Image: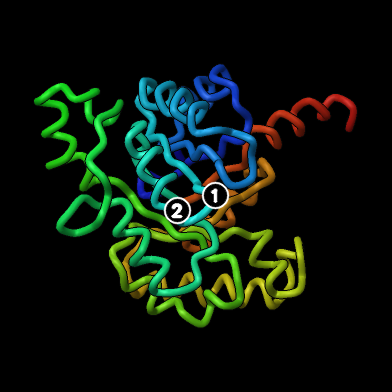
Amino acid sequence: MRNSKISLGTWLSLYNEGIAEILANAGYEWITIDLEHSSISISQAEKLIRVIDNCGTKPFIRLSSNNDVQIKRVLDAGARGIIIPMVESEDDVKTAIEHISYPPKGNRGMGLSRAQGYGESAKKISYINEYSKQIELYIQIESKAALTKLDELFSKEINGYMIGPYDLSASLGIPGDFTNSRFIEAEELILERAKEYNIKRGYHIVEPDEKELDIKISNGYNFIAYSVDFRMLDVMARKPFKK
């Protein structure tokens, strides 16, 4: 890794345990299984979580929405981090915190599944009392509305944020134009606010571009998703024909 202070992960959108294993053994700290923009089911996500976890990499889940049922199911399957899409209000963050936390802090139900050792006493107790409190929570900043609420969002008990570049640029009226001054100004605003609250500063680099990775690190990002499985595959598959 370029810097030990940089948390570098990647994105998984294809349901394939072999791809998950390859990425998990590549050196990333975490891999996010995408439930928002993929056809991956909860059952399939559990299998991918198991593969990633058994390789010693953190399995994260990007949810389809801030949904308590979906959250409890992926956490019971063993997810170690949650990424909430399209967060725009203080209530959105409070709701997410309640969903991932057991009482009295939250309202998460007491399930017995893979995360809890399938009910085995010692594993169940250690998960409830210890490991469940280490679940990481990240929010996605993806809209103009969120830009006006950054202090409210970042002051809560979250590990950090991640910019969804395509949704944020679309919300600004410049879809996919990441060099536009409006997008750059929004990036800088989010970065500066996040530094004040000492939370992880995240960005999803969709194209597998190492130069872009170095630029984001030099700009101050320290929680970076590097590309996504299908873009890595597509770019490398086409490379011989671009010479």
Q: Position of residue 75 (x, y in %)?
A: 34, 39
Q: Tell me if mark 2 has few (under 14), some (14-19) or many (20+) residues whose alpha carbon lies within 10 angstroms of its own.
A: few
Residue drawn at x 23%, y 57% is 106
Provide the secondary structure element on which disc 1 rests. loop
Q: Quadrant of the N terminus?
A: top left
Residue drawn at x 44%, y 44% is 70
Is any part of residue 218 visible from this angle? no
Q: Are marks 1 and 2 in contact (CB under 8 Å)?
A: yes
Provide the secondary structure element on which disc 2 rests. loop
Q: Quadrant of the C terminus?
A: top right
Q: Tell me if mark 1 has few (under 14), some (14-19) or many (20+) residues whose alpha carbon lies within 10 angstroms of its own.
A: some
Q: Which residue lies under the disc numbered 2?
A: 67
Say which amino acid is labelled 1. Ser
- Specify the label residue 222 is tagged with: none
Residue drawn at x 38%, y 66% is 93
Q: Nearer the viewer, residue 214 or 124?
A: 124
Q: Position of residue 158 (x, y in %)?
A: 33, 61
Q: Position of residue 198 (x, y in %)?
A: 32, 67
Residue drawn at x 83%, y 29% is 238
- Count of numbered badges drawn on the protein: 2
Say which amino acid is labelled 2. Asn
**Is residue 27 depicted above or below 62 in this figure?**
above
Q: CA distance from mark 1 to mark 2?
A: 8 Å
Is any part of residue 69 visible from this angle? yes
Is 188 placed left or right of 113 in the picture? right
Q: Which residue lies under the disc numbered 1?
A: 64
**Residue at the extreme bottom of the image, as rendered:** 148
Is 218 placed left or right of 130 in the picture? right
